[in-house]
């Protein structure tokens, strides 16, 4: 996902890592219950640290960017290695000797060219596209019936460490998989851990949405130079400018969410800004479309941010521009779009996300077929797919629609709709959100009171904002209830998108809270699989789409005071 750029005087970037001391703390193999999160007033020390750092413009305990003396000097993504946690399967074949970065022929095929300074005979890391291959193999060769792709958008290794330190109240690790979060400690099935390169085919260019064409050639390409970025996500980079594409020797582009999500769902490298198009702008089939077509699986995508932002859109849509939100939503719902005018795909069986109430009269980035009103889901399209209203709109209604409703519990509205959809074998569309189109941001101590960051003002939520929206965990429960009706199996993407929004804003308090929000959704998945004794039939992949550029110099500083 993208975020508004920082003010002009915040324009540079860096990275210092944490060294590699051995982990000397014994690990508790059982996940701590989420109910164990501290919530008393004293734990708001992280919020105080965040506020002080922004006001004083510096913090001894950490910083975002390239200047240790400046708390915030970069608010965008970086070309960092990011973690992958696998449950019910193994990632080992893609790491070390199996790394595509050791094989010249495979590397050239992956990038469509030989990326500069990227081939490494000793590369231990995998590529983001290997996550697609892992899912495909699990279904095709291992017979997995329940596949979950959980994307903590923008969550790099440093974000998980910060959240783990705060949750456990100790600094238990400074390298490796880590401990403290449920997806670090869960041991009730075979599991694995690895890390991946997220670099795109090339950087974003200007596009013509109506023609579905680029109007300029790509002039900056992707790749990964471990000499400068490190061979593991916790290592210190040797060129502080490299992760942001400013190296004089290897100026590789860093990814955006549309390119990286395309790698996760379609197994290819693409241009930043494009959704499920190869670098020749040819649409490619996603894992969801393939498994729907070939295996008869039900498929779904849910998110804590706008319904057709880059990551959930990449589950099913295709477009030259990630900003063409209404058309991306049409693809997700099986409606004709600018990219699929006469032969739309069948659509996702479950779509739950945000953007409710976000209206605009501007068509910027959305082409000639833009309809003024909701930025993400037009009233006309919603009526067409709703089983209760489609006849009046000439549509083909397949969805039970749940949306934010004044005075009603969002959790109950969604749960009731999910129950109805499951009982009547219908699809489910959920549409919620607070201001700026996302769920209310949870902060580290569990409240919904974000403090000052690189945005102009902290967001303030009303009681209705909290009550009338479900949580990501409740969205996950609703999606599973509908998808599990399909006897063939299902594939589900769950996106904790607010991690990215928090990291773009350089807000460590909101970042930690967003990780916890996603962790609660992961727990729902694990408990559902356990309740069915279904680990032999299940694969859960937990990862991110890219990293940011936070440096936690003093991990113990995040222990609640």
Image: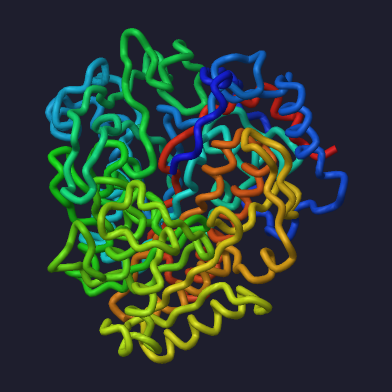
In which quadrant of the rendered view does residue 390 lie? bottom left
Q: Position of residue 487 (x, y in %)?
A: 32, 81
Query: Residue 258: image x %, image y %?
Result: 34, 44
Answer left or right for 218 relative to 163.
left
Q: Quadrant of the N terminus?
A: top left
Image quarter in which the C terminus is found = top right
Q: Residue 163 lies in what quarter of the image? A: top right
Query: Going 28% across and 62% down the picture, which residue do you hit?
Result: 288
Which residue lies at the image location 27% right of the left edge and 43% below the top edge? 274
Q: Is residue 137 left or right of residue 506?
A: left
Colour theme? rainbow
Q: Residue at x 26, y 70 (%)?
A: 334
The answer to whether residue 413 is seen in the rendering is: yes
Q: In the rendered view, tell whether residue 476 sits above or below residue 509.
A: below
Q: Taking 453 as reference, is 413 left or right? A: left
Above or below: residue 172 compared with residue 327:
above
Name the image quarter holding residue 316.
bottom left
Residue 536 visible within the image? no
Q: How many circles with numbers are drawn on the protein?
A: 0
Which residue is drawn at the image coordinates 38% and 49% (left, top)? Answer: 310
Looking at the picture, tell me which residue is in the foreground, 41 or 318: 318
Viewed as shown, does residue 294 lie left or right of 39? left
Looking at this rendering, what residue extends furthest in the front direction?
361
In front: 45, or 119?
45
| Place of residue 106 in the rendered image (x, y in percent of width and height, measured from the top left) | 16, 32
Residue 346 position (above or below residue 557): below
Residue 352 in the image: x percent, y percent?
Answer: 45, 67
């Amino acid at each position: 996902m993208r975020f508004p750029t920082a003010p002009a005087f915040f324009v540079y970037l860096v990275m210092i890592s944490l060294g590699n001391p051995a982990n000397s703390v014994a690990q508790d193999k059982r996940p701590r219950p989420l109910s164990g999160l501290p919530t008393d007033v004293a734990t708001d020390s992280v919020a105080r640290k965040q506020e002080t750092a922004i006001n004083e413009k510096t913090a001894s305990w950490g910083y975002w960017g390239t200047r240790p003396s400046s708390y915030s000097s970069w608010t965008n993504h970086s070309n960092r290695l990011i973690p992958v946690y696998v449950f019910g399967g193994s990632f080992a074949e893609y790491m070390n000797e199996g790394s595509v970065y050791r094989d010249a022929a495979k590397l050239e095929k992956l990038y469509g060219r030989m990326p500069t300074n990227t081939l490494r005979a000793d590369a231990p890391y995998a590529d983001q596209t290997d996550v697609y291959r892992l899912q495909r193999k699990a279904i095709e060769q291992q017979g997995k019936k329940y596949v979950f792709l959980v994307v903590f958008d923008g969550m790099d290794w440093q974000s998980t460490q910060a959240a783990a330190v705060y949750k456990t109240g100790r600094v238990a690790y400074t390298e490796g998989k880590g401990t403290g979060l449920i997806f670090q400690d869960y041991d009730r099935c075979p599991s694995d851990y690895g890390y991946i390169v997220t670099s795109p085919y090339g950087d974003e260019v200007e596009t013509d949405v109506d023609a579905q064409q680029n109007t300029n050639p790509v002039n900056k390409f992707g790749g990964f130079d471990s000499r400068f970025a490190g061979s593991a996500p916790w290592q210190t980079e040797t060129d502080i400018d490299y992760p942001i594409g400013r190296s004089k020797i290897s100026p590789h582009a860093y990814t955006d969410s549309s390119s990286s999500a395309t790698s996760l769902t379609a197994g290819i490298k693409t241009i930043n800004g494009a959704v499920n198009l190869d670098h020749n702008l040819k649409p490619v089939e996603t894992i969801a479309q393939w498994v729907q077509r070939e295996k008869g699986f039900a498929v779904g995508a849910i998110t804590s941010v706008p319904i057709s932002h880059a990551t959930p859109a990449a589950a099913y849509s295709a477009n030259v521009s990630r900003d063409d939100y209404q058309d991306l939503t049409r693809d997700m719902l099986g409606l004709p779009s600018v990219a699929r005018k006469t032969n739309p795909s069948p659509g996702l069986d479950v779509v739950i996300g945000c953007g409710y109430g976000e209206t605009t009269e501007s068509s910027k980035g959305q082409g000639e077929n833009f309809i003024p009103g909701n930025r993400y889901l037009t009233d006309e399209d919603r009526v067409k797919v709703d089983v209760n209203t489609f006849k009046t709109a000439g549509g083909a209604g397949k969805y039970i629609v749940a949306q934010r409703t004044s005075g009603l519990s969002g959790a109950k509205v969604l749960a009731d709709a999910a129950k109805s959809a499951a009982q009547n074998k219908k699809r489910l569309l959920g549409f919620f959100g607070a201001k700026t189109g996302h769920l209310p941001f949870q902060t580290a101590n569990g409240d919904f009171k974000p403090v000052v960051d690189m945005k102009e003002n902290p967001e303030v939520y009303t009681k209705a904002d909290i009550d009338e929206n479900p949580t990501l965990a409740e969205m996950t429960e609703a999606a599973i209830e509908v998808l599990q009706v399909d006897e063939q199996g299902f594939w589900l993407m769950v996106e904790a998108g607010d991690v990215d929004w928090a990291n773009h804003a350089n807000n460590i308090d909101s970042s930690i809270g967003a990780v916890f929000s996603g962790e609660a959704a992961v727990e729902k998945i694990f408990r559902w699989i356990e309740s069915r004794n279904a680990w032999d039939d299940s694969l859960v992949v937990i990862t991110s789409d890219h990293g940011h550029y936070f440096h936690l110099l003093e991990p113990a500083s995040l222990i609640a005071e």
